[in-house]
Amino acid sequence: MMSPFSHTSPHARRTGMLVAAALVLAVAVPASALPGGGKTPRSIVEAQQDTPPQLKGVDVEEHLGDIVPSEAVFTDAHGEQVKLGSVLSKTRPTLLTLVYYNCPMLCNLVLNAQVKSMRELGLELGKDYEALTISVDPEDTPAMSNERRRKHLQSMGKPESAPWHFLTGTEAEIRRVADAVGFKYTYDASTRQYAHPAVVMVLTPEGSISRYLYGTDFPAKDMKLALLEAAGGRVGTSFDRVVMSCFKYDTATRRYGFYIFGFIRLGALAVFFALATMLIYFWRRELKKGAAA
């Protein structure tokens, strides 16, 4: 292939090569390394990044198997100081959410989606599981806790004695729990709002973190399986526990998906019981024939 400079004079060729080299350097060398480049303004760097400045540091760092700090002190909806361990069930799994009451949108979406799933679970709040909501805003009050608690229990048709605890607390105690469960949130002073992830955490009766459910839509199947898993199969019906073997949590999709080997085991059991029933039927029929003879 002929060079684009093959028909030009030596001087022109040298000039063209220098221009080409300069263009390569301009592309390859960072602007800050060029004369007068200096440091890229922070506003430009932030504008070029995908994450808005207000959302930096907002994340969920999964701490599966870790124990929540039972000694952390909060205030309940009645204005009484309580230790976290005293409101967590020792015999049932717990749905844990971290929100704040003046949140303009996301917290309401999370809690409403949680309520929707709780209505469709087929499990009973207080009998099969409990719920706990902690405000991340130290300015939130017990009166606000009581209002939210009453509203959500009423929407589920549950009495005010139902075990869904709403707690408020100091910045230190809130951070203590948030850090323990890996809930990363930030406060934006310009909007006076908290930026935070949308997640429901499932705790075992021992107070350890069993599962994280993400988003603003929690399929009842996923929440139910997570509760069954957290309880070690101690809640739900026998059929629920059999069905649980046919689903497996997929860490990539963060959903419970169909588990083919569990289905094969369930199918094998069904075939076994069908064959056993058939054999018993023929055996009893032969016994009746023998007796009649």
Image: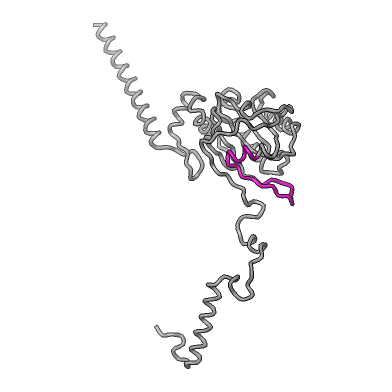
Q: Determine the residue positioned at 31% across, 16% down.
A: 280
Q: Is residue 15 left or right of residue 265?
A: right
Q: Residue furthest top?
A: 292
**Location of residue 209 in the rendering, given as x and y in whole percent from the top left corner:** 54, 35
Q: How many labels does the image show?
A: 0
Quadrant including the N terminus: bottom left
Q: In which quarter of the image is residue 106?
A: top right
Q: Quadrant of residue 102?
A: top right
Relative to 40, residue 109 above or below: above
**Location of residue 96 in the rendering, given as x and y in whole percent from the top left corner:** 60, 34
236 vs 203, nearest the viewer: 203
132 vs 254, nearest the viewer: 132
Relative to 191, residue 7 above or below: below
Q: Determine the residue positioned at 58% across, 34% down.
A: 68
Relative to 32, residue 88 above or below: above
**Location of residue 187 in the rendering, given as x and y in whole percent from the top left corner:** 69, 47
Q: Is residue 139 visible?
A: yes
171 vs 182, nearest the viewer: 171
The stretch of residues the image draws in magenta is: 175-195
Q: In which quarter of the image is residue 288?
A: top left
171 vs 291, nearest the viewer: 171
Q: In this view, does 254 lie to the left or right of 290?
A: right
- Tell me if residue 257 is in the magenta stretch: no
Q: In this view, does 16 lie to the left or right of 158?
A: left
- Tell me if residue 177 is in the magenta stretch: yes
Q: Determine the residue positioned at 74% across, 47% down.
A: 192
**Location of residue 46 in the rendering, given as x and y in whole percent from the top left corner:** 64, 60
